[in-house]
Amino acid sequence: MDQASDGFSFVPATELARQIREKLVSPVEVTNALLERMEQVNPAVNAFCTVTADLARQQAKAAEAAVMQGDELGPLHGVPVGFKDLTATKGIRTTYGSQVYASNVPEQDDPIVTRIRSAGAIVFGKTNTPEFGHKGLTDNKVFGPTRNPWNTQYMAGGSSGGSAAAVAAGLVPIAEGSDGGGSLRIPASACGVVALKPTYGRVPFASSLGNPFSSFAPFLHHGPLARTVADAALLYSVMAGPDSSDPLSLPADGQDPLAALNRPVKGLKVAYSPSFGYYEIDPAVLQIADEAAQTFVSLGCQVNRVDPEFPSEKVINKAFATMWAVKIAADYQHLLPEQEDLLDPLVVQIIRKGLGLPAMEYKAAEVARSLVFQAFESVFANYDAVLAPVLAVPPFPLDSPGPREINGKPIHLSHGWILTHHLNLTGHPAASIPAGWTAQGLPVGMQVIGRRFAETTVLALSAAFEEVKPWANRRPQL
């Protein structure tokens, strides 16, 4: 691959924005180079399902004119960005990964899209997702599977797998994703990039179905995917803040996410829970997680092994599955039975399960949810953050539905390999940062979990780790 197509592929968004502001590079030059890389690389990974090349070039020309005219520039001026195909984009096909909506073109942007566009970003298109974001792997009947840039025979995670793979593959420096059970953190871990799931309500969540309360059970979050912590903080700073469309969005907190990157972390008390007290963890993941925890010790943090006092695995999984089934059923029951053949069979199964759940069982899930919340809060009474792996296993082959056992012990096929959905029951902020790579060259991510409203602590710890264990200079060989 020549320098013209690769020259901007791994330049951080913060650096691109600076160079564009200082007229060192042109938005048109950046856009053309990355669109050329898109043509060469995207077929191998299938990260973008809709590429808006003409729109991107048009926006890049307008961005260049604004620079030359001395206009006031937004923080993302001229920076390419991808949007998950669950996020509504005005005038751009948004399929939700479903054959039912294969030709859907929204008439308005979600609030975060409006914010990112207003910040000057160049829209490169939509990134792949499983149908309605229903699982932690990215494939669907419309576009097929997204492949891991580090090994295209392996999965990229989900449901924001397209966004994570796009960033890892150098197609765009930053992308938007969403997280209802780990959908930012799972693919970030699998693809070796950074994700930030903010505190619930920090970033407004729009419902394409007109229910502004639909993000409550479980908690749904929008957030950034990026190659560096600074880039994630930059995109988060644009996304955050209340919006009248979301009655559960939080007031602005007045904190500067980018300033948090330079906060000292020496003396912070950090709880390390490699298994949350009940997961089986693959030895390769455990070794990388242990080494990452020791890195925080070397940074001056006080790190102790602490497992939250969760209820049983069965209770947690049942509570989450109940909430998820009811949400999917409430949103998409109108598609049955007439359009059932167009849907992923697992989506149909989830809808039918949700339709059969009595109201009292749904409300009873809140008891288990409360116990998970209280377990985290008990830890946060004494600690500033919690460290845990994102996944119990490294990325696995693309043709596998997931591991059925770890360390010779059977696990739950849907929940037994992800350590993420607890935080969608509680709403705490959590990042996924690259902690290391296996001997096979596959990424392993670490969650940095903070107190509610403590995104700045999560970002400070993540940036401090990145400073001593940098990963952005490592690139997949595509």
Image (cartoon, grey):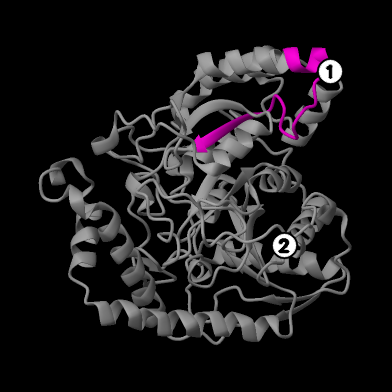
Q: State the residue at coordinates (25%, 60%).
A: 350
Q: Which residues are magenta?
A: 65-83
Q: Nearer the viewer, mark 1 or mark 2?
A: 1
The quarter in which the N terminus is drawn is top right
The quarter in which the C terminus is drawn is top right
Q: Is residue 150 visible?
A: no
Q: Is residue 266 left or right of residue 387?
A: right
- In the image, residue 76 lies in the stretch drawn in magenta: yes
Judging from the image, what secondary structure is the residue with disc 1 in? loop
Residue 231 quadrant: top right
Q: Nearer the viewer, residue 188 or 151?
A: 188
Q: Is residue 138 visible?
A: yes
Other residues around mark 2 within 10 Å, as few (<14) / some (14–19) / many (≥20) = many
Other residues around mark 1 within 10 Å, as few (<14) / some (14–19) / many (≥20) = few
In the image, is residue 311 above or below residue 196? below
Q: Nearer the viewer, residue 437 or 155?
A: 155
The residue indicated by pointer 1 is: 70
Which label belongs to residue 458?
2
Residue 385 x/y as whole percent: 71, 72
Say what amino acid the circle numbered 1 marks: Gly
